[in-house]
Amino acid sequence: MRRTILCVLVIVFAIPTMIFATGSQEASGERVGSAPGPLGAYDAPITMTWAVPTSPVNQLLDGDTYDDNRWSQLYAEKLNIDLEVAFTADSTTAAYDNKLNAVIASGDLPDVFRTANFSVFTELALNDQVADISSPYDEYATASVKAFQERFTDAFEGVSLRGGLYGIPRMNDNFHNAPFLWIRDDWLENTGSEPPETVEEMVELARLFATGDPDGNGVDGDTYGLTMSNGLLAQNHTSVRGLFSAFGVPGQGSGIFYRDASGDITYSWIQPELKEALSLLNQMYEEGLVNEEFTANGLNDLIEDITSGRVGMAYGSNWGTWYPYNLVYQRDGVITRAYPVPTIPGRPYRVGISSNKGGAVTVLRAGYEYPEAMIKMLNLYDETVNGGGQDGYATYWANEQYRLSPIYIDLPNEVYQTDLNESFRTGSSDNLTPFALRSYEYVIGFGDGDGPLKDDPNAYGTWGQMNPDGSLNVVLQKYIPDGAVVQNIMAQTVPEVWRTNVAVLETLTLTTFTDIIIGARPVDAFDTYVEQWLRAGGQATLDALEEIYPEE
Ligand SMILES: [Ca+2]
């Protein structure tokens, strides 16, 4: 019975679509053929709409637009796929998610789109709103693309539901989530300081930065100590989760779930150790060692302060040399470096990362007539950026240009870091793949800001992550060997109770932490907060997770 109704609905809705569809052969209702193989072009142009997640780091170069650019031209030329923008929205604010939610509600999905919200993905997949692409993937993906599946098995497992493949996952190890302490070179030098290894030393350095004259403009105290923003826990810059790590609490963003010493699943932002961390931040706030107007500022509001040199130290993610510290380097030629988070002697520190089974995923609208087109684009992307020569890389990946492709492979730098380290040791790049070689040349070319590529933003960006002491090596040579990295247990399956309550609980956490830091509430308010958190869906989430993710 249900099947009959569905058939009728499909017919009723299919007829107007066929009448009004535009485009050459599509109008006749006949499927456009294509040359065989992973990179075979269609015989006539086919149309694919996509959603563009914009961000401040996106760059439109050489007259490119979101509608007409190097990637849309490449896909049209090589595959006969005409890309059309369904919508653009800022993915660094709530705008993109809001817009996506609106089009999901209206049922008018773009043909291809990306979501960083795994709950949204799961719901779309379980409701059959996005396509099971396992057949076109098996048939069309190149050996090179399939090799990524071997490297990132967790990621592919995460987008596999009910035996189907419902998207192309973000291929990137989430240890990229780990926090660091970023410090300007010139401020350390001007204050005669060493990078802090302990939390105590970090506080002392914040004191020097906040009260002294680290920027050397002759005025004491017109600079920030430790810079924070109102997104205290965000996976980005100016968060304080790196400080919380030192107190043994792994977490990021909405918090992570992990097993405590007794083997039970617990949650990062309810750990009692945070009372000490919040007390410390409160003391620093009272003493003027943090930017006191942080409650009014998001990261974007602080960019001017960062660029103009009022900020010299902040906790943040591994990509600081790409953004925002590239702005400092471009303006003043000053390097800002990532250091391991300062720790507390005698106490194990822990850094929290997302599960490698979850994360951003690129999906295809169910019912899109040419499902293999998405795989062909992925193949062409991989061939152009990862397999191509220097030109392909420079034109299509560098300067964030990969973001103009509806589907891309996040660069698995960590896969190449060990190869690069070997080359740093031997001074020979013979062992490197073309992609790794480019990274190597950027690192060597940047030098320490005095190499031939010192003015190339890609060289500075790559250098910050991949130099012998760069952020990736901090993870590989310190965080991982120290046993500090903790993965979120919650992965592809998010309990309904968490989905329903996470926004409220997140606000509760942020409000409580902010109030304690600014002294609006005493630190003991933390205990009440934990009780509230548990009652308002937290405990139910912990219980649900014990069932969904039983101890292995
Ligand atoms: Ca000053």
Image (spheres, grey):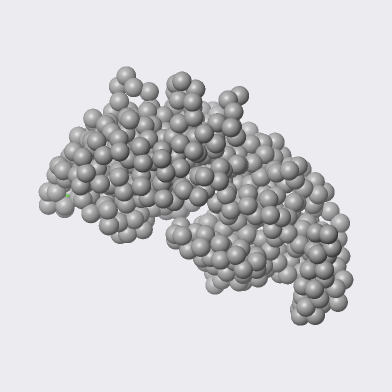
Count the labels in the image. 0
Q: Position of residue 203 (x, y in %)?
A: 22, 35
Furthest-front residue in this view? 1
Above-or-below relation of 274 to 391: above
- Image point (78%, 68%), residue name: 9
Q: Position of residue 197 (x, y in %)?
A: 30, 29
Residue at left 76%, top 42%? 163
Residue 264 relative to residue 273: left or right? right
Closest to the observer: 373 or 426?
373
Residue 240 on image: x %, y %: 33, 41
User: Dividing the image into 4 quarters, which one contains the C terminus?
Assistant: top right
Residue farthest to the bottom, as pictured:
20
Visible in this render: residue 59?
Answer: no
Where is residue 150, by image quadrant? top right
User: Does 289 sit above or below residue 50?
Assistant: above
Q: Horizontally, is 188 left or right of 397 in the view? A: left
Q: What residue is shown at x 63% (from left), y 36% (from top)?
A: 154
91 sits to left or right of 375: left
Residue 495, given in percent of the width and then of the height, sits at 56, 42
Inspect this view and state whether residue 521 appears.
yes
In which quarter of the view is residue 10 placed? bottom right
Image quadrant where residue 416 sits: top right
